[in-house]
Image: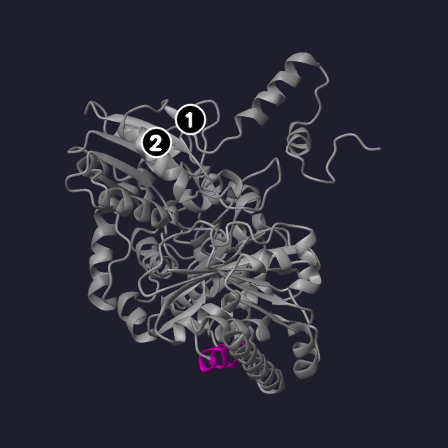
Amino acid sequence: MFQIRIHGRGGQGVVTATEMLSVAAFEEGRHAQAFPSFGSERTGAPVVAFCRIDDKEIRLREPIMEPDALIIQDPTLLHQIDVFAGLKHDGYVLLNTHHTFESIGLGDFVKERDHRRLCTLPATQLGLKHVGRPIPNVPLIAGFAALSDMIKLESVIKAINEKFSGKVAEGNIAAATEAYALVKEQMKEHSHA
Amino acid sequence: MLKQTEGSKAVAEAIALCRPEIICAYPISPQTHIVEALGEMVKAGELTPCEFINVESEFAAMSVAIGSSAAGARSYTATASQGLLFMVEAVYNAAGLGLPIVMTVANRAIGAPINIWNDHSDSLSQRDSGWMQLFAETNQEAVDLHIQAFRLAEELSMPIMVCMDGFILTHAFERVDIPSQEQVDAYLPPFEPRQVLDPAEPMSIGAMVGPEAFMEVKYLAHAKQMQAIELIPKLADEFKNIFGRDSGGLIRTYQIEDAETVVIAMGSILGTIKDVVDEMRAEGHKIGVLGIISFRPFPLEQVRAALIKSKRFIVLEKSLAVGMGGIVATNVRMAVTGSGLRGFTAIAGLGGRAIPKSSLHKLFRQAEKEELEPVTFVDLDWAAVNKQLEREKQTRRSGPIAENMLHDKGIVGVSAKFG
């Protein structure tokens, strides 16, 4: 079983992101379970949501405490909560920022980890560019697909088409496609480094 | 059709396939997405003939359901928590009048302290109301139980609550097989009411009944539930024939054949329990699971038969009979009266507290060794509890308990004293 935890803020589409991830995994014939950490949600408040992917039925209902992957939709959360809590040592991290890990103070954190599993992505800018809104969720799940190879870009696009239609779907597909390419490019640089 | 969808959406689709004629509900978390989706279907003309009635409260919701059911319409509503409590007088009336209303309860805690998260306190508070109560383990089962519920309710002319864990199921995306309209039509015939308010043939429903007949009417409600004990497994068998899967029934066992210790629970926590049991089995522990699907009627004989070969059981329940212990546990103990089985009660998950596998591993190992107290409160913060008890001993004006607890636990921004 592969477990993904997404941190973000109310209004950033955190819950939708896990739901779309689960749909993408389902499209590949896998079992998936997405659920939010429930609360009286409001715009800007920290939000956590979870997604499990497996090849057999998922029965477990506990929150994800030891994730295989973290997607951090808002880097300002780093100063507010321990987003890395329980992350497996070889776990993936995808962070929404146009800075590097080092320049936002995570130099020590990345030093101890496999750099092929860590990536930053300017997802908010991609959302603005392609959808016209600063919502980073769709670029991030496409970026996660590129980082982890857990799901294919085509499956993310299927999930986008299931959730959105018309211009919004088109914009999100463009954002996802660029995000996927950007992360693959970074991964290539890492493997040459 | 197999799809990856939200529990609430799946249930809304299942309800629509059952061809309800009246849907009335008042929004309350975590039930809201179900009736929202149904409201959209009615408005879009996808669900006809059906009227969606906006009501001003849960009391009105159940009152409308009583009226529409008495007029011969297949009637559906949904609620949770305080909403269920607010409709209680009408809840009892629906059962007393013998009206086959189906209601989803998206299980949620009851305040105070106000809390929107999941436990089973709401529907279990209505255990003696005369409504049947079926508990879903997964979203697939929630879909399937609703289809069976209309059939069961209408055959017996008694109302049913289909209970699904609020948020944990209602808000979870997982794979669900939504049946076809042909399958549901083959399983669920049109509603043929036992009593109808019809202006062409006027009659009254809801007579005042004095001591001369009250007990007989009440006994008949009990008799209906005893009939349900026979009917529920038959309807599950018939369901399997048409839909091709096991869903519903009175109880469901897992790894129980040679089990010395049996864990008993209701609802979605059964999934986590099964994972723990598999891990313990791999280490050689003789442990199994008994899931209770039908809480009302309570299947005393079936529960006894499932447990009788074991040595001990532990009931893990998301409810608390304050001043006594467990609600489900009390029912289970009744089932095994005189058997000599050791029984333990574990209260867990109240107000949405997560029930992790690690806590269950520890709890079940203690149960195996019979090291537990009769009632255990899983993952209770004893330091916080004792601090408040000590405060109450020291100070007469010890203040509001909930605010004190939040303050002691360092939850920011909460204080009983202002300034």
Asked which secondary structure carries label 2, the reply is: helix
**Magenta run includes residue A162:** yes
Where does label 2 land, which residue?
A: B329
Residue B378: image quadrant is top left
In the foreground, A156 or B176: A156
* Kind of residue indicated by mark 2: Ala
Judge if badges 2 and 1 mark residues of a common chain. Answer: yes
Q: Is residue A2 above or below residue B218?
A: below
Where does label 1 land, which residue?
A: B325
Asked which secondary structure carries label 1, the reply is: loop
**Magenta run includes residue A65:** no
Q: Residue at x 36, y 34 (%)?
A: B362
Instruction: Say if mark 2 contacts mark 1, CB within 8 Å.
Output: yes
**Chain under disc 2:** B
Where is residue B237 drawn, in percent x and y?
A: 20, 58
Is disc 1 surrounded by few (<14), some (14 to 19) or many (20+) residues within 10 Å?
Answer: some
Where is residue B252 drawn, in percent x and y?
A: 25, 48
Q: Residue at x 74, y 40 (%)?
A: B413
Q: For the magenta stretch, what is the residue range?
A: A153-163
Is disc 2 surrounded by few (<14), some (14 to 19) or many (20+) residues within 10 Å?
Answer: many
